[in-house]
Image (cartoon, rainbow, N blue to C red):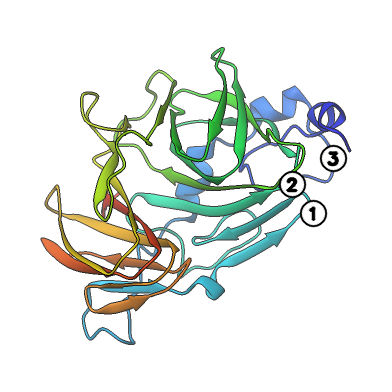
Amino acid sequence: MDRKDFLKKSLIAGLAGSILPAAVNAKNVSSSKSTYDKLMDQVGFNHLPNQKGVNTMNTVLHKANTRGQANHGWLEARHSFSFASYRNPDRMHFGVLRVLNDDKIAPLKGFGTHPHDNMEIISIPLEGALEHKDNMGNGAIVRDGDVQAMSAGTGLTHSEFNANSDQDMKLLQIWLFPNKRNVTPRYDQISIKGIAKKNEFYQILSPNKNDQGVWIHQDAWFHLGKFDQETCTNYQIKKSGNGVYAFVIEGTATIAGQEVEKRDGFGIWNVTDFDIKADKNSRILLMEVPMQIS
């Protein structure tokens, strides 16, 4: 199916990863349960203590091969937390971090126009380019080296497609519960190529409009790091009570004494800081988030 036909036939109600058997008309979309309420219905377990490798109650390890999987032909997705048809009561969220999807989208395919509300949505392309359109009048291409953030607030609709005709598009899609509901929807996108540092973590997201990176309605800080040699560093928690969920995009690392491999997720909380040793050719995303949903 080409993109023109797909756009006509693929209105997606609710979660962006849920593929309905038929198109949903506008009346049904408007009456469907909100994104926030659907995801709040599913929370319950913040995290389970890691029972192997680290003898402490403040870490959790999610191996890459334990994630939920979905293959829709045009979309291959891996879910670190319960999402769409993947339900695991032990893997609902990590604090306010509710969704971490590792998606691969086929050329010229994607998500047709669908709604969201009261979620902070962050997209980080890993390969290729994503074409974005929304009902706020934004139209953009989000590429590897960019970060996109949306505050869904009172409600928005948008579509996302692989902008390339000859290659797959890979990206991380991350959803956080906000600390303020029913805000005016907003869109933000920046290039992070100019702020990237060699063998260091650098900030790409924060709660503050004047800080480096994009900003959102949540006391969260995201840092990326790309390491081409063995490097040791220490991460300091920005706000008391926050935890950090680390996601290894490439390579391996030792985080707070735990070996973490490619596409593994590792959560740590009830600490003020922790050490990280990144191996050669590693790329790591650190997501510091509140551990309580307000």
Q: Is residue 179 above or below residue 154?
A: below
Residue 205 vs 253, above or below: the answer is above
How many angstroms separate mark 3 from mark 1 (CA)?
Answer: 16 Å
Give the residue number, with chain letter if any, for mark 1: 73
| Label 3: which secondary element | loop
CA neighbours of label 2 inside 10 A, class few (<14), some (14 to 19), many (20+)? many
- Name the front one of labels 1 and 2: 2
Q: Nearer the viewer, residue 124 or 127?
A: 127
| Residue type highlighted by circle 1 | Gly
Residue 128 percent location from the top left of the image: 61, 41
Answer left or right for 115 relative to 91.
right
Badge 2 marks a residue whose secondary structure is loop
Q: Position of residue 233 (x, y in %)?
A: 17, 62
Mark 3, residue position: 22
Answer left or right for 119 relative to 230. Answer: right
Residue on which disc 2 sits: 106
Nearest to N terminus: mark 3 or mark 2: 3
Q: Secondary structure at mark 1?
A: loop
